[in-house]
Image (cartoon, rainbow, N blue to C red):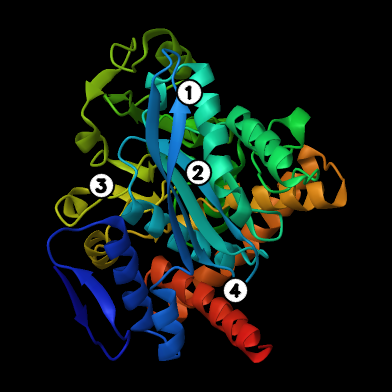
Amino acid sequence: MVKRTRTNALPYLLILDIMDNPFTNALKQLKRAASIQKFDEGFLARMQKPEREITVSIPVEMDNRELRMFEGYRVQYSSARGPYKGGIRFHPDADINEVRALAFWMTLKCAVANIPMGGGKGGIVVNPKELSRGELERLSRGWVDMLYPVLGPRVDVPAPDVNTTPEIMGWMVDEYSKRSGDTTGATFTGKPLGGGGSEGRGEATGMGGFFVFEALRDAARIPASSKIVIQGMGNVGINAARIFKNHGHTVIALSDSKGGIVNEQGLDPAAVEAYKRAHGTLLGFPGARQIRNEELLELPCDVLIPAALENQITGENASRVNARLVLELANGPTTPEADDILFKRGIPVVPDILANSGGVIVSTFEWEQNLKGEHWSEKEVLKKLHDILSAETAGIWEYSKKMKTDLRRSAFCIALVRLEKAESARRGTR
């Protein structure tokens, strides 16, 4: 049952009574931001609903000649500031509420970074590990076949996300060009370097998170040489581990979906990655003790980096978080209830819409390079990324102190001001 509740700060907020889900949390975050700064009620009502949601059935011929149907999504949340922008995830637990929430957060993320993009997200309900390479290619091309009329470099620009890769983006670009005739390659980002991809894209999210951390480290009173705990061994997590270690910090714990490992004297991310590649797990890594993921989130450290999936730090475990700072490289890892607990405990949470925005910023650089027929050096890309994130982080920190609020509400308010201005300008031209 869905109940419609009216509040002064946020009209017609949808609350799902029977279960929590990521989009419920996203709307709670919107309500919390609207409680500290006044926004037009019509604008807030529009921000609670995506502009368009598409669900498709994708037919794929499997290697055994059987025809199998896969469910796919694209949520186009807001185009007020530019083309829809957001990744495509391949995951067996993907659903429309998750994709909707991620599209909402991407809308805010692009506004926080002040780049000319809107927000969107896509997904397919699938475990890609169960598919052959040929089946995976046919599925990827099938997603494009079903959705290409609503994609385009000036309309909707997808990118990689969980379980999607530069190779998959390359297949999608090729399929889109066949279907549409577009030759810019700018409809998809996160492509291989030889296929129009950008320098620096692979490490952009981790590097961006590090730039954000550096921009607020002194103000947050975090040691120059910090102890780091990272949940998640995907592209973002392992790149963050390498980057923090290379800049003089000590990574004391890492985990994947099966569990984690700890060594208070420090782990070598390259050795851990090689072990996982060889054994399919971190468990048994020499010189480290094993822990559960739940324990990892409660380890004493200077910086806790959730770099896995949503809803990891909750109202149930937030009181046991033992970090001086939480840096969200995953999307939605901290629930609103946990935000309140951590804020009261004086533990800053650097929100995902700021901390992990490096990926979408460099994706936007890739889009710009494709449209202009240019190719920028890695040094130029990282310099541009550093300058954007340093400036936006400083503004969000200053606003949080001025309003005596947490960093998430501060970031949301700054993003919402920019979105409201763009919405107002768009309505004024109609």
* 296 sits to left or right of 398: left
Q: Amino acid at mark 4?
A: Ala
Q: Position of residue 219 (x, y in %)?
A: 49, 62
Circle nearer the viewer, 4 or 3: 4
Mark nearer the N terminus (3 vs 1): 1
3D distance between C-alphas at marks 3 and 1: 22 Å
Q: Which residue is mark 4?
A: 80
So how many labels did they put on this image? Answer: 4
- Confirm whether residue 7 shows in the render: yes
Q: Report the front residue among 35 and 99.
A: 99
Mark nearer the N terminus (4 vs 2): 4
Residue at the far right: name it.
Answer: 373
Q: Position of residue 252 (x, y in %)?
A: 37, 29
The residue located at (55%, 46%) in the rendering is 210
Circle nearer the viewer, 2 or 3: 2
Q: Which residue is mark 3?
A: 322
- Image: 389 above or below 60: below
Mark number displayed over residue 269: 1
3D distance between C-alphas at marks 4 and 3: 40 Å
- Image: 104 above or below 225: below
Residues at circles 4 and 3 in contact by the CB criterion of under 8 Å: no
- Image: 127 above or below 29: above
Q: Which residue is mark 2?
A: 88
Q: Amino acid at mark 3?
A: Asn
The residue located at (41%, 29%) in the rendering is 233
